[in-house]
Amino acid sequence: MMIFRKVVLLLLTSCLFCGPACADEGVVNSVSYIPFPTPTTLRVRQLDDSYENMALKADIEAALKAAGFRIAEESNLILNFGTRDEIGAWSMTGRRSIIFLKSKVGSDGAENALAQVNIFDSDRGALLNKGQRRNGTSITTPSSYRIDFDIAQTTTGKQLWQGWAISDLAGASDGRTLVRRMVPTIVDTLGKTVRQKRFELRE
């Protein structure tokens, strides 16, 4: 019984102190194919010429310089980067449902319609009651953002290193802010192999 109480207390403590801090996290992965000296001179190139990526290029170059790398327009090593986003899913909660309509095609080819009346639902509400839930929207899958890096030799085209970082849109105000906060961590992994490493997003 004492062990059970300790486990429950530990879980409650985790929930209390792991709210925003745990939300402001990401996961980084990287693979080193061919070793190269770091820091070194790099040319930075965006795979998409969107306004957001053009602005992000300046942030990446600043993070590289802070880590000791040199930036040059002519270099044997080129760092390519790109961003992707996956919009989350939402569901309506608490909406009172009274009639359900179904339709299907029968064996004779005719379309058969079926109507069902929801009489009572203590949770969402039905014909005879309003239910206990409030109407609203709940997030079932949060939006996530990803930034991809790779380093290749310009002379041979060989890929030396690849890395990517992913985070859910939770504490950040928008996707661009979220991606910018992932940049310093993924710069730290240049030339290294990292597997499923969790990190806190940096301001």
Image (spheres, grey):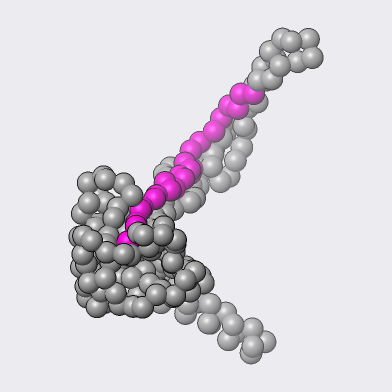
The residue lying toward the viewer, choosing from 2 and 190, is: 190
Q: Is residue 197 visible?
A: no
Q: Position of residue 132 (x, y in %)?
A: 50, 47
Q: Compared with residue 178, is residue 124 higher up or lower down, i.e. above or below?
A: above
Would you say the magenta stretch is mainly helix, strand or loop?
Answer: strand
152 relative position to 55: left or right: right
Magenta range is 78-102
Which residue is pictured at 41% across the width and 57% down the height?
A: 157
Which residue is pictured at 22% across the width and 46% down the height?
A: 51
Q: Position of residue 178 (x, y in %)?
A: 31, 60
Which residue is pictured at 69% across the width and 20% down the height?
A: 104
The residue lying toward the viewer, choosing from 158 and 108, is: 158
Q: Position of residue 49 (x, y in %)?
A: 26, 45
Residue 128 quadrant: top right
Q: Is residue 62 visible?
A: yes
Residue 184 quadrant: bottom left
Q: Position of residue 33 (x, y in %)?
A: 49, 69
Residue 136 quadrant: top left
Which residue is pictured at 33% across the width and 65% down the height?
A: 77
